[in-house]
Amino acid sequence: MSRIFAVSFASVYPLYVAKVEKKGRTQAELDRVIEWLTGFDASELADHLAAGTTFEDFFAAARLNPDASLITGVICGHRVEEIEDPLMQKIRYLDKLVDELARGKSVDKVLRG
């Protein structure tokens, strides 16, 4: 089991926000990306952040978008489509979407629209 599974999503979320804002994107765009992937609306996301939900529990409660399998590419030296552990793959899906948003890709393209 990877250490990231037990890390609270709330401890990493500000890093995601800082990453996208540093590149001229907004927290609202980040939240939209998270909602697309997990199905969590703003209220549900706020609840998970307030509760300190771990990544494991965060993704266990998520309603993963059926188009998540369209997320491909390399993140942290690994192809996301080839990651065998389902939870790690979901975490890397999120990392990949955040990276794409920060790199200036349009939100519609990030959301595979």
Image (cartoon, rainbow, N blue to C red):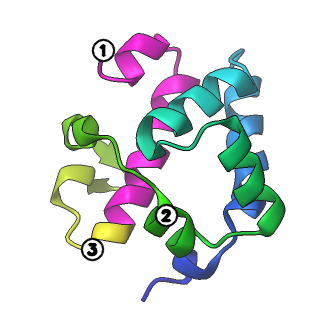
Front residue of this view, candidates 69 and 40: 40
Give the magenta part as a residue range.
88-113
Q: Is residue 46 above or below residue 32?
A: below
Q: Residue at x 33, y 56 (%)?
A: 77
Which of these two is toward me, 75 or 67? Answer: 67
Residue furthest toward the bottom?
Answer: 1
Mark 1: which amino acid? Answer: Gly
Chain-order first, disc 2 or disc 1: 2
Report x, y in % for residue 14: 78, 47
Pick out the residue farthest to the right.
50
According to the picture, the residue beneath numbered tag 2 turns out to be 61
Q: Is residue 86 visible?
A: yes
Please state which amino acid type lies under the numbered disc 3: Asp
Q: CA distance from mark 1 to mark 3?
A: 26 Å
* Residue located beneath label 3 in the image: 85
Q: In the rendered view, does 90 fall on the left or right side of 41?
A: left
Distance from disc 2 to disc 1, alpha carbons, whole Å, reads: 24 Å
Query: Secondary structure beneath disc 1?
Result: loop
